[in-house]
């Protein structure tokens, strides 16, 4: 719960507490149960990605020191098998979800306060532009966290409505609207602008099929049009994408969009030089440094992050790395095939990461990467816990009718 509370606020405190949690898990591990859990594809895939990163250190063109540094963003995947095991064993997974939601609600309120009184932000002197209304960290992290809460609350409201629980649907519905208002009127990343509609459509399709998906798309289009007219911030954010593309195309101006396009163009070239096993772990920075020699404008930009997860894996580990990356996403998508609220939340985490990884290397970023590891580990473990119970014990749990129990049991719930 402390980890979930702190993730939106502090990277340092989170980094201190995570090893403590892993030590507690290891100190009380049920070995047969853990072995059975770790053999599942959802646990093996992150371990395979880490193993590939370790192996990539030995053929890294940047040297062993750079390889060790490049291993840092991948270490977090060692925690996922332990989290999947832990939340299969623990009955308190819903407490962690509640803690994260509570933390984001507090951050939401703080964000609105900072809009009217910027001096109250923790990051003083950063009250304008992309940091307007962002009291801690940065606008990308805040947008991703708020997007998860928005879509998760939307899924909860849909599930309550599907079970004719109108009053219970009101609170999550209002919560989703509150997060949406902040994203529309305060600050939003371009990744969230793309990711939120995709996640909403996926949830609507899962909950109610094609008709629900089409209805969500239609209502969403109307709401987006209203938000477009009402929010200068949203209009400026969207229009800036095209204007920055034109500046990059015509004058190589190093804008946010221009840099990404240049990084992607160079990444294709780096990949083509070593397509099978890549240039090795931690080689991205050196490749960009070498290519920037003698160049000007946006072509002279040097970075260790190509702002695309596929390119990041392809440059370092070639086709092999891309295959392992996609295997990880597929294994985790398959965790959430059943139709229940927990499965929807886990699916939302994976879909958000896949969409966000088109524009960023989110698995290797701190906040987004740990949000993925913690979210998938939590939801996947809770689903495994539910699956291990007998049908009779599942029916005796009221909370299971709303959170853990698949929607196929909705009729029996109504009869009760």
Image (cartoon, rainbow, N blue to C red):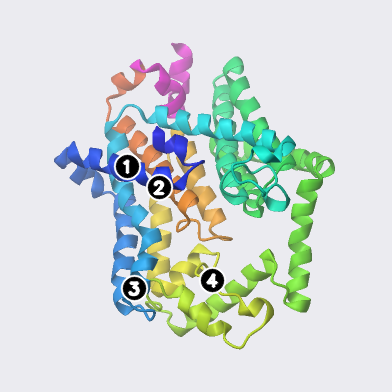
Is 196 displayed left or right of 184 in the figure? left
Task: Compare residues 42 and 10 and report the one nearer the observer.
Answer: 10
Q: Which residue is mark 1?
A: 83
Task: Compare residues 237 and 110 and report the one nearer the observer.
Answer: 110
> Residue 238 location in percent, x, y?
75, 54
Q: Which residues are magenta?
A: 396-416
Q: Magenta stretch: dominant SS?
A: helix
Other residues around mark 3 within 10 Å, as few (<14) / some (14–19) / many (≥20): few
Q: Residue furthest left?
A: 32
> Residue 293 location in percent, x, y?
57, 86
The mark nearer the N terminus, 3 or 1, is 3
Q: Secondary structure at mark 3?
A: helix
Q: Is residue 407 magenta?
A: yes
C-alpha gap between disc 2 and disc 3: 26 Å
Task: Compare residues 152 and 70 and report the one nearer the observer.
Answer: 70
Other residues around mark 4 within 10 Å, as few (<14) / some (14–19) / many (≥20): some
C-alpha gap between disc 3 and disc 1: 30 Å
Which mark is on residue 373? 2
Other residues around mark 1 within 10 Å, as few (<14) / some (14–19) / many (≥20): many
C-alpha gap between disc 1 and disc 2: 8 Å
The mark nearer the N terminus, 2 or 3, is 3
């Amino acid at each position: 719960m402390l980890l979930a509370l702190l993730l939106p606020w502090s990277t340092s405190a989170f980094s201190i507490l995570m090893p403590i949690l892993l030590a507690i898990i290891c100190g009380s591990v049920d070995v047969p149960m853990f072995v059975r859990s770790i053999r599942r594809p959802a646990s093996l895939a992150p371990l395979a990605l880490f193993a590939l990163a370790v192996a990539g250190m030995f053929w890294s063109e940047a040297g062993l020191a750079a390889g060790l540094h490049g291993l840092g963003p991948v270490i977090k995947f060692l925690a996922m098998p332990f989290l999947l095991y832990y939340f299969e064993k623990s009955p308190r997974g819903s407490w962690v979800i509640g803690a994260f939601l509570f933390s984001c609600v507090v951050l939401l309120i703080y964000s609105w306060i900072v809009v009217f009184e910027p001096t109250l932000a923790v990051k003083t002197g950063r009250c304008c532009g992309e940091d307007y209304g962002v009291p801690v960290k940065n606008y990308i992290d805040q947008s991703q966290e708020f997007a998860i809460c928005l879509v998760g609350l939307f899924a909860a409201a849909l599930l309550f409505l599907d079970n004719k629980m109108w009053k219970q649907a009101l609170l999550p519905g209002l919560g989703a609207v509150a997060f949406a208002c902040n994203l529309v009127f305060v600050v939003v990343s371009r990744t969230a602008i793309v990711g939120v509609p995709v996640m909403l459509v996926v949830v609507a399709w899962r909950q109610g099929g094609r008709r629900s998906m089409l209805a969500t798309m239609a209502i969403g289009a109307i709401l987006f049009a209203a938000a477009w007219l009402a929010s200068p911030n949203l209009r400026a954010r969207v229009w800036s994408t095209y204007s920055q593309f034109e500046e990059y195309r015509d004058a190589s101006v190093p804008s946010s969009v221009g840099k990404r396009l240049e990084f992607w163009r160079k990444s294709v070239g780096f990949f083509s030089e070593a397509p099978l096993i890549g240039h090795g772990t931690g080689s991205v920075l050196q490749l960009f440094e070498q290519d920037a020699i003698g160049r000007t404008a946006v072509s002279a930009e040097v970075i260790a992050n190509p702002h695309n997860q596929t390119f990041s894996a392809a440059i370092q580990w070639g086709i092999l790395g891309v295959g392992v990356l996609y295997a990880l996403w597929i294994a985790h998508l398959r965790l959430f095939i059943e139709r229940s609220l927990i499965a929807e939340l886990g699916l939302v985490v994976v879909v958000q990461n896949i969409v966000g990884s088109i524009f960023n290397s989110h698995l290797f970023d701190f906040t987004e990467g740990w949000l993925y590891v913690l979210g998938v580990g939590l939801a996947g473990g809770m689903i495994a816990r539910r699956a291990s119970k007998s049908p009779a014990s599942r029916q005796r749990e009221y909370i299971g009718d709303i959170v853990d129990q698949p929607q196929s049991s909705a009729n029996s719930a109504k009869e009760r």
